[in-house]
Amino acid sequence: MALHQMDTQTAKSKRIAKKTIAWVLVGLFVATLIPLLAASFYSRPMADDYSYGKAAARVWRDTHSIAAVISSAADLVSQSYYDWQGTYAAVFMFSFQPGIFSEKIYYLSTFLLLGSLILSTGFLLYTVLVTRMKEDRWTWMIITSLVLMLTIQFVPSGAQAFYWYNGAIFYTFFYSMMLLLVGLLLRAQLVAGWKLGLLTTGAALLSIAIGGGNYLTALGTILIVVLFCAYTFIKKSRNAWVNYLVLVLLFAGLLVSALAPGNGVRADALAQEGIPTNSIPRTILIAFYRSAMEILAWTNLQTLAVLFLLAPLLWQIAKRSAFSFRYPLIVAGMAYCLFAAQFSPPIMMNLYGDGRHVNILYYSYVLMVVGLAWYFLGWLSRKTFARFPQGIDRMIAQRSPYRHVLIGLCIVLVLAAAWDANQKGWLSKAAAMSIGNGQAQQFAAERDERLLQYLNPDVQHVVVKPLSVQPDIFFDTDLGTPDWWVNKDVAIFYEKQSVSLTE
C-alpha cells in the first residue's frame, strides 16, 4: 500500500512538473509574439500589394461593397490566368490585402499570417499527439511552444513571412492551409457520420485552394497525400476514400493552375530578363544539392538546443507508441526526398532564393527534423530495451547521476544557442529594436506623409520624398523611377497620373 501511494505521488508530481513547464513555455512563446505584433502597426503596403490590390481598391472606394470587391477579385483571377499566372486561389486572395480599405489597418496582415501559422501548427500537432497518440495536453503544449518558437524566431526572412501581405499570403498562408489539411486527413480516419462529412468537406475545399496556390506547397501536399493513400490502402482503412478524393482534387487544381496560358507569358518575360528555366534533370540535381545545404545550415545551435530539450519527451512518447520503428534509414530517406521535392518549382524557374520561398521550406524542415528525432529515438528505444531493459530510462530517472549530467549539457547547449542567436538576432529582437530605435515609427510617419498626397484629389502628379529609413523587419521594395512598375501600380491604386520621387 505504501509503495502504491509513493508511486501515485511520484506520478502526480511529474504531472505537476510537466504542467508547470508547459505553462512557462506557453508564456514565453506569447511574450515573444508581443514585439512582432507591436511592429506590425508600423508596417505599410509594398510592391505587389498595389499591383494585385489596385482594382479592388478602386471598387471599394466607388461602392463600399464587399460583394463588388469579391467580383473584382474574380475578374482579376480570370485576367491573370491568361496574362501572368495560373495560381487562381492565391490571386483571388491577393485582392484582399487590408490596404485596399485603409493603409492604417495593414497591420492585420501580420495578425492573419502569424495566427494562421500558429493555429495550423498547433492543430496538426494536437491531432498527432493528443488525438492519434493519446498523449496529454501538457505534452502537446510543450512541443508546440518549442516548435513554434524555433519556426517563427529563426525564419529566414521575417519581412516576407509576416509583414508583406502579398508574398506571405502566397507562401506562409498556403503552407498553413497544408498543415490544416494534413490534420483533417489524420482525423478523418477516426470518425464516421456527420463528423466525417464535415471533415471531408473541409479537406476538399482546402485541396482546391492549395492546388491553386504556390507550387512548392501544392507539390509537397500532393506527395504527402500520396503517402497517406498508400498507407491507408495497405491498412485497408475504411475511410481511405477521403485521401483518394483529396488527391484527385489536388491534382485537378494543380493541373488547372499549371496549364494557365499566363504561365507561358511569365516564363517568356523572365527569359527576356535573362532568367531561363532549368531542365527537369538539372532541376532534380540542384534540388537535392540545395536541400542538403539548407539542412546543414539550419541544423544549428538553436535547432540542436530545441531537439535536446525535446529529447526526453520524444523518448517517452516513442517508448509508449505502438510503432515498431524498424526502418529509420528508409524513413529518413523518404523525408529527405519529400523535402527536396519542394525545392523543384522555384529552381526550375531559376527563382530559388527569394525569402518567401525559403521561409516555407524552413517551416517544413523544423517539423521534419522533430519528426525524425522522434522516429530515431523510437528506433533506439526498441534497441535499448531489447538489450538493456532500463537503459536510457535509468539515465533520466529522477535520482540518477546521469540525469544531472544531461541537465548540465542541456543548459550549456541552450545558453550557447541563446548567445549565438543574440549575435544573429531573434525576429522578436529585430522587431523590438526597430521600435526601440525609432526606425519603425519614422518609416510609418514618412509613409503616412506620402498617403496625404495620394489621397489629395487636387494632385494628379504626385512627387514624394525618398524614405530616410527602411527597417529590416519590413519588406524593402520602394518606389523608383516614374516608369517603374511599382510607381505605375501605386499611381493606379490611388488613381493618379504619375508617382515619382524627388531627386
Image (cartoon, rainbow, N blue to C red):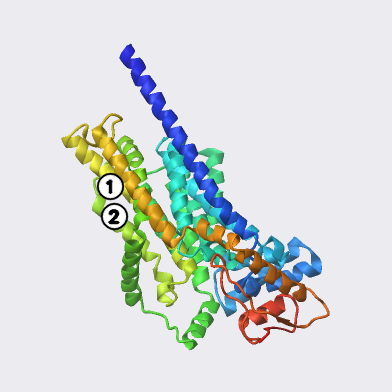
Residue displayed at 33% across by 71% down: 284
Residues at discs 1 and 2 in contact (Cβ within 8 Å):
yes
Residue displayed at 57% across by 54% down: 35
Q: Give the label on residue 332, or none.
A: 2
The part of the image, by quadrant, that contains residue 6 is top left
Residue displayed at 76% across by 67% down: 60
How packed mark 1 is, by other alpha carbons closer than 10 Å (few <14, some 14-19, many 20 or more), is many
The part of the image, by quadrant, that contains residue 353 is bottom left
Q: Locate residue 132, reporting x and y percent.
A: 42, 39
Residue pushed farthest top? 1
Element under label 1?
helix
* Whether residue 149 can be seen here: yes
**Mark 1 to mark 2: distance in Å?**
9 Å
Q: Amino acid at mark 1?
A: Phe
Quarter of the N terminus within the rendering: top left
**Pointer 1 residue:** 376
